[in-house]
Image (tube, grey):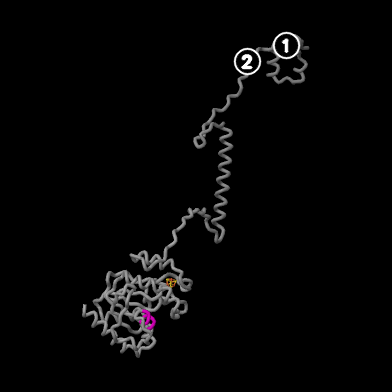
Amino acid sequence: MIDFQSISPLQRGWLLELGLERAFLARLPQPQVAPQPVAAAEPAAAPAPVVDPQQGVTTSPVSRLVSASEAASDATSARDKALALLRKPGSRPVVAAVEEPLVQKPAVLIQPEKTQDMASLLEQVQACQECGLHTGRSQVVFGTDQVLEPDWMIIGEAPGTSDDRSGLPFDGKAGLLLQAMLKSAIPEASVYKTHLVKCRPVGSRSPTPDELAACRAFLDAQIRLVQPRRLLAVGHLAAVALSGREDDLETLRGQTLAYTDSLGRSLPLVVTYHPASLLLRPQHKANAWRDLSLLRQLQGQS
Ligand code: SF4
Protein backbone atom coordinates (compact mmCIF):
# COMPACT_ATOMS: atom_id res chain seq x y z
CA MET A 1 0.00 0.00 0.00
CA ILE A 2 1.38 3.28 -1.09
CA ASP A 3 1.33 6.07 1.28
CA PHE A 4 0.18 8.76 -1.05
CA GLN A 5 0.62 11.42 1.50
CA SER A 6 4.37 10.77 1.63
CA ILE A 7 5.05 11.03 -2.10
CA SER A 8 7.21 13.89 -2.88
CA PRO A 9 6.80 15.98 -6.00
CA LEU A 10 9.90 14.30 -7.43
CA GLN A 11 8.37 10.87 -6.92
CA ARG A 12 5.14 11.97 -8.49
CA GLY A 13 7.08 12.96 -11.52
CA TRP A 14 8.68 9.49 -11.74
CA LEU A 15 5.32 7.78 -11.37
CA LEU A 16 3.96 9.86 -14.20
CA GLU A 17 6.98 8.96 -16.29
CA LEU A 18 6.37 5.25 -15.56
CA GLY A 19 2.83 5.45 -17.07
CA LEU A 20 0.59 5.41 -14.00
CA GLU A 21 -3.03 6.30 -14.61
CA ARG A 22 -3.96 9.98 -14.40
CA ALA A 23 -6.88 8.90 -12.22
CA PHE A 24 -4.43 7.37 -9.80
CA LEU A 25 -2.37 10.47 -9.78
CA ALA A 26 -5.48 12.52 -9.33
CA ARG A 27 -5.85 10.88 -5.96
CA LEU A 28 -2.55 12.33 -4.89
CA PRO A 29 -2.73 15.50 -2.89
CA GLN A 30 -1.91 18.55 -4.99
CA PRO A 31 1.21 20.27 -3.75
CA GLN A 32 0.71 23.75 -2.46
CA VAL A 33 3.03 25.79 -4.61
CA ALA A 34 3.50 29.40 -3.70
CA PRO A 35 2.78 31.56 -6.67
CA GLN A 36 5.95 32.87 -8.25
CA PRO A 37 6.13 36.50 -9.19
CA VAL A 38 5.81 36.60 -12.93
CA ALA A 39 7.25 39.42 -14.93
CA ALA A 40 4.55 41.29 -16.71
CA ALA A 41 4.39 40.12 -20.27
CA GLU A 42 5.64 42.70 -22.66
CA PRO A 43 3.06 43.77 -25.11
CA ALA A 44 3.61 42.50 -28.61
CA ALA A 45 5.85 44.84 -30.43
CA ALA A 46 3.90 47.00 -32.77
CA PRO A 47 5.03 46.64 -36.33
CA ALA A 48 7.39 49.33 -37.46
CA PRO A 49 5.63 52.13 -39.30
CA VAL A 50 6.20 52.22 -43.00
CA VAL A 51 6.33 55.37 -45.03
CA ASP A 52 4.46 55.13 -48.29
CA PRO A 53 6.79 56.76 -50.82
CA GLN A 54 3.91 57.50 -53.17
CA GLN A 55 1.64 59.16 -50.65
CA GLY A 56 4.24 60.52 -48.29
CA VAL A 57 2.15 59.34 -45.35
CA THR A 58 2.99 56.86 -42.66
CA THR A 59 0.95 53.66 -42.55
CA SER A 60 1.15 50.46 -40.65
CA PRO A 61 2.31 47.36 -42.53
CA VAL A 62 -1.20 45.97 -42.24
CA SER A 63 -2.89 48.94 -43.65
CA ARG A 64 -0.21 49.05 -46.38
CA LEU A 65 -0.87 45.44 -47.18
CA VAL A 66 -4.59 46.08 -47.38
CA SER A 67 -3.95 49.04 -49.56
CA ALA A 68 -1.69 47.05 -51.84
CA SER A 69 -4.28 44.34 -52.07
CA GLU A 70 -6.98 46.82 -52.89
CA ALA A 71 -4.72 48.51 -55.45
CA ALA A 72 -3.95 45.16 -57.06
CA SER A 73 -7.65 44.41 -57.14
CA ASP A 74 -8.42 47.80 -58.66
CA ALA A 75 -5.64 47.40 -61.24
CA THR A 76 -6.90 43.94 -62.19
CA SER A 77 -10.41 45.28 -62.48
CA ALA A 78 -9.30 48.16 -64.69
CA ARG A 79 -7.22 45.86 -66.85
CA ASP A 80 -10.13 43.41 -67.21
CA LYS A 81 -12.41 46.25 -68.26
CA ALA A 82 -9.87 47.49 -70.77
CA LEU A 83 -9.38 44.01 -72.21
CA ALA A 84 -13.13 43.52 -72.41
CA LEU A 85 -13.39 46.79 -74.29
CA LEU A 86 -10.65 45.80 -76.70
CA ARG A 87 -12.19 42.40 -77.32
CA LYS A 88 -15.61 43.88 -78.04
CA PRO A 89 -16.13 43.84 -81.82
CA GLY A 90 -16.05 47.31 -83.26
CA SER A 91 -15.07 48.87 -79.99
CA ARG A 92 -12.71 51.80 -80.15
CA PRO A 93 -10.51 53.21 -77.47
CA VAL A 94 -12.13 56.12 -75.80
CA VAL A 95 -10.09 59.24 -76.21
CA ALA A 96 -10.82 62.05 -73.86
CA ALA A 97 -12.14 65.01 -75.78
CA VAL A 98 -9.78 67.93 -75.77
CA GLU A 99 -11.67 71.11 -75.36
CA GLU A 100 -10.22 73.73 -77.61
CA PRO A 101 -10.53 77.27 -76.50
CA LEU A 102 -13.07 79.19 -78.54
CA VAL A 103 -11.20 81.59 -80.75
CA GLN A 104 -13.34 84.17 -82.42
CA LYS A 105 -12.02 84.72 -85.94
CA PRO A 106 -12.24 88.30 -87.11
CA ALA A 107 -14.75 88.75 -89.91
CA VAL A 108 -13.21 89.17 -93.33
CA LEU A 109 -13.94 92.56 -94.80
CA ILE A 110 -15.02 92.12 -98.44
CA GLN A 111 -13.43 95.08 -100.20
CA PRO A 112 -11.86 93.82 -103.42
CA GLU A 113 -11.61 97.33 -104.85
CA LYS A 114 -9.23 98.38 -102.08
CA THR A 115 -7.26 95.16 -101.81
CA GLN A 116 -3.53 95.60 -102.30
CA ASP A 117 -2.33 91.99 -102.39
CA MET A 118 -3.42 88.62 -103.75
CA ALA A 119 -3.41 86.86 -100.39
CA SER A 120 -5.93 89.30 -99.00
CA LEU A 121 -8.07 89.05 -102.14
CA LEU A 122 -8.04 85.26 -101.95
CA GLU A 123 -9.08 85.42 -98.30
CA GLN A 124 -12.04 87.60 -99.25
CA VAL A 125 -13.09 85.23 -102.06
CA GLN A 126 -12.90 82.28 -99.69
CA ALA A 127 -15.16 84.06 -97.21
CA CYS A 128 -17.54 85.37 -99.87
CA GLN A 129 -21.24 84.52 -99.83
CA GLU A 130 -22.33 87.35 -102.07
CA CYS A 131 -24.27 85.09 -104.40
CA GLY A 132 -25.95 81.69 -104.24
CA LEU A 133 -23.02 79.92 -105.92
CA HIS A 134 -21.23 79.68 -102.59
CA THR A 135 -23.69 76.96 -101.49
CA GLY A 136 -22.58 74.58 -104.24
CA ARG A 137 -18.83 74.98 -104.04
CA SER A 138 -16.44 72.50 -102.52
CA GLN A 139 -13.86 75.25 -102.58
CA VAL A 140 -13.35 78.49 -104.42
CA VAL A 141 -11.43 78.35 -107.68
CA PHE A 142 -9.38 81.51 -107.58
CA GLY A 143 -6.59 81.21 -110.14
CA THR A 144 -3.40 79.41 -111.09
CA ASP A 145 -0.13 80.14 -109.32
CA GLN A 146 0.55 83.81 -109.53
CA VAL A 147 2.89 84.90 -112.28
CA LEU A 148 4.12 88.47 -112.09
CA GLU A 149 2.90 90.48 -115.07
CA PRO A 150 2.14 87.47 -117.27
CA ASP A 151 2.00 87.82 -121.05
CA TRP A 152 -1.59 86.60 -121.04
CA MET A 153 -4.39 86.31 -118.52
CA ILE A 154 -6.83 83.62 -119.72
CA ILE A 155 -10.38 84.16 -118.44
CA GLY A 156 -13.11 81.54 -118.74
CA GLU A 157 -16.72 81.43 -117.66
CA ALA A 158 -16.98 79.45 -114.43
CA PRO A 159 -15.32 76.52 -112.65
CA GLY A 160 -16.37 73.07 -113.76
CA THR A 161 -16.60 69.91 -111.69
CA SER A 162 -12.90 69.10 -112.05
CA ASP A 163 -11.97 72.67 -111.15
CA ASP A 164 -14.16 72.54 -108.06
CA ARG A 165 -12.45 69.32 -107.01
CA SER A 166 -8.87 70.47 -107.58
CA GLY A 167 -9.29 74.17 -106.83
CA LEU A 168 -7.58 75.01 -110.13
CA PRO A 169 -9.14 76.66 -113.18
CA PHE A 170 -9.27 74.78 -116.48
CA ASP A 171 -8.69 71.39 -114.96
CA GLY A 172 -9.91 68.28 -116.79
CA LYS A 173 -10.22 67.59 -120.52
CA ALA A 174 -11.12 71.15 -121.57
CA GLY A 175 -8.12 72.46 -119.68
CA LEU A 176 -5.83 69.97 -121.41
CA LEU A 177 -7.07 71.13 -124.80
CA LEU A 178 -6.54 74.78 -123.85
CA GLN A 179 -3.04 73.95 -122.68
CA ALA A 180 -2.26 72.27 -126.01
CA MET A 181 -3.64 75.25 -127.95
CA LEU A 182 -1.56 77.75 -125.99
CA LYS A 183 1.55 75.62 -126.26
CA SER A 184 1.24 75.40 -130.02
CA ALA A 185 0.56 79.14 -130.48
CA ILE A 186 2.55 80.92 -127.79
CA PRO A 187 4.84 78.30 -126.20
CA GLU A 188 7.15 80.87 -124.68
CA ALA A 189 4.43 83.03 -123.13
CA SER A 190 3.68 83.20 -119.40
CA VAL A 191 0.00 82.79 -118.57
CA TYR A 192 -2.34 83.16 -115.56
CA LYS A 193 -5.78 81.53 -115.67
CA THR A 194 -9.01 82.29 -113.88
CA HIS A 195 -12.79 82.51 -114.41
CA LEU A 196 -15.45 85.23 -114.31
CA VAL A 197 -16.95 83.66 -111.15
CA LYS A 198 -14.97 81.85 -108.47
CA CYS A 199 -17.52 79.23 -107.42
CA ARG A 200 -18.87 76.34 -109.49
CA PRO A 201 -22.48 76.57 -110.68
CA VAL A 202 -24.01 73.20 -109.81
CA GLY A 203 -25.00 71.19 -112.89
CA SER A 204 -22.39 72.90 -115.09
CA ARG A 205 -24.84 75.65 -116.07
CA SER A 206 -23.72 79.12 -117.04
CA PRO A 207 -23.67 81.73 -114.26
CA THR A 208 -26.65 84.10 -114.20
CA PRO A 209 -26.25 87.88 -114.77
CA ASP A 210 -26.71 88.44 -111.01
CA GLU A 211 -23.97 85.94 -110.18
CA LEU A 212 -21.66 87.52 -112.76
CA ALA A 213 -22.33 90.97 -111.31
CA ALA A 214 -21.76 89.76 -107.73
CA CYS A 215 -18.33 88.35 -108.57
CA ARG A 216 -17.18 91.07 -110.96
CA ALA A 217 -15.35 93.14 -108.35
CA PHE A 218 -13.13 90.14 -107.53
CA LEU A 219 -12.17 89.69 -111.19
CA ASP A 220 -11.40 93.38 -111.68
CA ALA A 221 -9.24 93.40 -108.52
CA GLN A 222 -7.50 90.23 -109.71
CA ILE A 223 -6.67 91.80 -113.11
CA ARG A 224 -5.39 94.92 -111.31
CA LEU A 225 -3.12 92.88 -109.01
CA VAL A 226 -1.88 90.33 -111.58
CA GLN A 227 -1.08 93.08 -114.11
CA PRO A 228 -1.21 90.97 -117.27
CA ARG A 229 -0.04 92.45 -120.54
CA ARG A 230 -3.06 91.09 -122.47
CA LEU A 231 -6.30 89.23 -121.92
CA LEU A 232 -7.72 86.19 -123.70
CA ALA A 233 -11.46 85.64 -123.14
CA VAL A 234 -12.58 82.06 -123.81
CA GLY A 235 -16.29 81.65 -124.50
CA HIS A 236 -19.09 84.09 -125.23
CA LEU A 237 -19.90 85.09 -121.62
CA ALA A 238 -16.29 86.04 -120.89
CA ALA A 239 -16.01 87.89 -124.20
CA VAL A 240 -19.11 90.00 -123.47
CA ALA A 241 -18.20 90.60 -119.82
CA LEU A 242 -14.67 91.79 -120.60
CA SER A 243 -15.31 93.72 -123.79
CA GLY A 244 -18.55 95.29 -122.57
CA ARG A 245 -20.11 94.54 -125.95
CA GLU A 246 -23.32 92.58 -126.40
CA ASP A 247 -22.34 91.06 -129.77
CA ASP A 248 -22.28 87.35 -130.45
CA LEU A 249 -19.04 85.41 -130.27
CA GLU A 250 -18.47 85.24 -134.02
CA THR A 251 -18.61 89.02 -134.21
CA LEU A 252 -16.20 89.49 -131.32
CA ARG A 253 -13.63 87.00 -132.59
CA GLY A 254 -10.77 87.77 -134.97
CA GLN A 255 -9.91 91.25 -133.72
CA THR A 256 -8.13 92.95 -130.88
CA LEU A 257 -10.65 94.36 -128.44
CA ALA A 258 -10.03 96.26 -125.23
CA TYR A 259 -10.74 95.65 -121.57
CA THR A 260 -10.99 98.90 -119.62
CA ASP A 261 -10.54 98.86 -115.84
CA SER A 262 -12.20 101.11 -113.26
CA LEU A 263 -9.41 103.68 -113.59
CA GLY A 264 -9.85 103.91 -117.35
CA ARG A 265 -6.70 101.95 -118.24
CA SER A 266 -7.10 99.55 -121.13
CA LEU A 267 -5.57 96.19 -122.03
CA PRO A 268 -5.59 94.33 -125.36
CA LEU A 269 -8.29 91.65 -125.40
CA VAL A 270 -8.64 88.67 -127.77
CA VAL A 271 -11.67 86.40 -127.88
CA THR A 272 -11.96 82.73 -128.85
CA TYR A 273 -14.06 79.63 -128.23
CA HIS A 274 -14.20 77.96 -124.85
CA PRO A 275 -12.19 74.71 -125.06
CA ALA A 276 -15.19 72.77 -123.70
CA SER A 277 -17.17 74.05 -126.66
CA LEU A 278 -14.42 72.95 -129.04
CA LEU A 279 -14.61 69.44 -127.58
CA LEU A 280 -18.33 69.37 -128.41
CA ARG A 281 -18.00 71.13 -131.78
CA PRO A 282 -14.68 70.16 -133.38
CA GLN A 283 -15.77 71.95 -136.57
CA HIS A 284 -14.81 75.22 -134.82
CA LYS A 285 -11.18 74.21 -134.44
CA ALA A 286 -10.15 75.83 -137.73
CA ASN A 287 -11.58 79.15 -136.51
CA ALA A 288 -9.91 78.65 -133.17
CA TRP A 289 -6.59 78.20 -134.95
CA ARG A 290 -7.09 81.59 -136.63
CA ASP A 291 -7.68 83.13 -133.16
CA LEU A 292 -4.45 81.57 -131.97
CA SER A 293 -2.64 83.12 -134.88
CA LEU A 294 -3.78 86.51 -133.59
CA LEU A 295 -2.39 85.63 -130.18
CA ARG A 296 0.92 84.70 -131.73
CA GLN A 297 0.96 87.94 -133.66
CA LEU A 298 0.33 90.03 -130.53
CA GLN A 299 2.90 88.06 -128.59
CA GLY A 300 5.47 88.81 -131.30
CA GLN A 301 4.88 92.52 -130.90
CA SER A 302 6.20 92.60 -127.38
FE1 SF4 B 1 -18.78 85.22 -103.98
FE2 SF4 B 1 -18.10 85.04 -106.54
FE3 SF4 B 1 -18.48 82.83 -105.13
FE4 SF4 B 1 -20.56 84.35 -105.76
S1 SF4 B 1 -19.23 83.24 -107.20
S2 SF4 B 1 -20.13 83.46 -103.77
S3 SF4 B 1 -19.66 86.39 -105.67
S4 SF4 B 1 -16.88 84.36 -104.80
Q: Which residue is mark 1?
A: 32
Classify mark 1: residues with Cα within 10 Å, few (<14), some (14-19) or many (20+): few
Q: Residue furthest left?
A: 301
The one of 33 and 3 positioned closer to us in this rendering: 33
Q: Main secondary structure of the magenta part?
A: helix
The one of 120 and 102 positioned closer to us in this rendering: 120
| Residue located at (38% from left, 76% from top) | 196
Q: Is residue 40 left or right of residue 131?
A: right
Question: How far apart, in angstroms, are the residues tagged by discs 1 and 2?
Answer: 21 Å
Whether 199 is drawn above or below 93: the answer is below
Q: Which residue is mark 2?
A: 39
Name which quarter of the figure residue 268 lies in: bottom left
Q: Is residue 86 magenta?
A: no
- Segment colored magenta: 236-241
Viewport quadrant of the C terminus: bottom left
The image shows residue 232 at horizontal and vertical percentages of: 31, 79
